[in-house]
Image (tube, grey):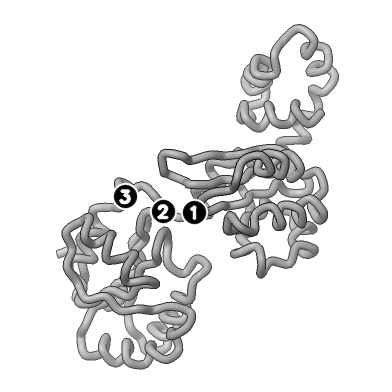
Amino acid sequence: MDISPHVFLYIVSTPIGNLGDFSNRGVKVLEQVDCILCEDTRVTAKLLEKFGVKKKLYVYNDNNAISVIPSIMLSMKDGNTYALVSDAGTPLISDPGYKLVNACIENNIKYTAIPGSCAVINALLLSGLPSNRFIFAGFAEHADFDVLSRVDATVIMYEAPTKLLRTLSKVELYFKNRYIAVVREMTKIYEEVIRGTARDVINHFGKNNPRGEFVIVIAPPNDKCAKDISKYDELIKIMMPTISIKEISKILSKLTGISKNVIYNYIKML
């Protein structure tokens, strides 16, 4: 058995794109619990069908969380086990799962998490930006750009394709020429990372219609990587007439240990 007789809620991370990322443990937990709570039964039904899981599905989202939690608590106290999933990624990240977890805490009901894909972490890894300290601001429409622009950490936020260019204009206004990475379609065949200033990315998507779900990653105000690279500004200027930016990036990466992609985009902005 992959579920415990003492645990009644499993927070199960699902793939953010590539179904091959779903863990064996995650699948087995979904097979063994009594009920699955999900954002959209149609989306989760497709996932379950892919892995041959047949289980009762119940909607749990922002609209009904408060009304359904009491009955879920009673059901758990009667011995029924539940899995909580989101449409994609890790539950509780920009969804109301925390309300259910708090209810479990208040009712002394044991819960656990089955780790897996998380768009926030995946985008941070792909960005090439400092990862030692970061803040996740949720969806951009709810973010306070003025406050975030003064935070000494990498800033991460979600955005929909229809709102991307408008949000990037706000990023340019508040974060100025700070280095950013915009990541889309993670783990899928068209995965893409566009790096540069907000203006660079705006220009890119002005020519290429934004498609898919986006994560915006913004460098901290005092990006140590940029400071470390800046020490080599004079050397870069000497090399540029005769050596390609790609080759310069390789050389400086070996000297500094900083990602070639980060150095490449820094040089492009000189």
Res 16 label: 2
SS of the residue under disc 2: loop
Front in this rendered view, residue 6 or 159: 159
Q: Residues within 10 Å of mark 1 (few under 14, many from 20)?
A: many
Q: Nearer the viewer, residue 133 or 243?
A: 243
Residue 128 sits in quarter = top right
Left or right side of 12 for 264 = right
Disc 2: CA contacts within 10 A as few (<14), some (14-19) or many (>=20): many
Q: Are marks 1 and 3 in contact (CB under 8 Å)?
A: no
3D distance between C-alphas at marks 2 and 1: 7 Å
Instruction: Identify the residue at image location x=59%, y=48%.
Output: 210
The amino acid pointed to by label 1 is Ala
Q: Residue at x 74, y 61 (%)?
A: 148
Task: Say which residue appears at 66% left-offset and 16% top-offset.
Answer: 251
Q: Quadrant of the C terminus?
A: top right
- Residue 236 x/y as whole percent: 79, 18
Could you tell me which secondary element the residue under label 1 belongs to? helix
Q: Quarter holding the N terminus? A: bottom left
Marks 2/1 in contact by CB < 8 Å: the verdict is yes
Mark sitting on residue 19:
3
Q: Is residue 48 left or right of residue 106?
A: left
Above/below status of 129 relative to 102: above
Is there any visible trace of residue 51 in the rendered image? yes
The residue depicted at 46 percent of the width and 81 percent of the height is 99
Looking at the rendered structure, which numbered label has been put on residue 157?
none
Identify which amino acid the numbered label 2 is placed on: Ile
Q: Which residue is mark 1?
A: 119
Q: Is residue 153 left or right of residue 235?
A: left
Q: Quadrant of residue 209?
A: top right
